Image: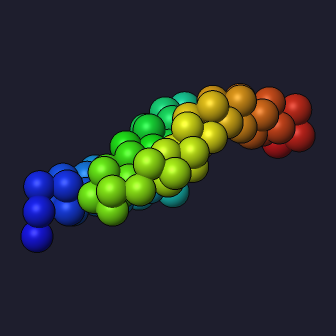
Amino acid sequence: MNVWTSAIVGLLLPLGLTVLAAWRGRSERRFAAMQMASFLSAAILVLVTFAQGEPSFMDLPLALVLLGLPGSLLIASFYDRFL
């Protein structure tokens, strides 16, 4: 196991905790947990890119970062309007 793989494994616990917070928290905590999960997922995907040595894998975390905040704001707008 190299350094990149151990860093990926180290980020899985915080990702699991943010998923748990998004599942069981109030709406404000869910929004913050979704943002944190999006950030951690992008960081894990960047580490996978370095672990595999494939620079073409970098497109997926960049797309996740660019679409994470607008998607979360869209969901928040949906909750505010319809629920």
Please tell me which residue lies in front, 55 or 39: 55
Location of residue 21 in the rendering, given as x and y in whole percent from the top left corner: 42, 50
Is residue 28 visible to the viewer in this orientation of the structure? yes
- Indicate the quadrant where residue 81 lies: top right
Q: Residue at x 44, y 38 (%)?
A: 39
Q: Residue at x 88, y 40 (%)?
A: 82
Location of residue 19 in the rendering, given as x and y in whole percent from the top left corner: 44, 55
Location of residue 10 in the rendering, given as x and y in whole percent from the top left corner: 18, 55
Q: Residue at x 50, y 53 (%)?
A: 57
Is residue 25 visible to the viewer in this orientation of the structure? no
The correct choice, above or below, for 36 with respect to 16 in the image is: above
| Colour treatment of the image | rainbow
User: For the C terminus, which image quadrant?
Assistant: top right
Q: Residue at x 52, y 51 (%)?
A: 56
Please tell me which residue lies in front, 72 or 26: 72
The correct choice, above or below, for 10 with respect to 37 in the image is: below
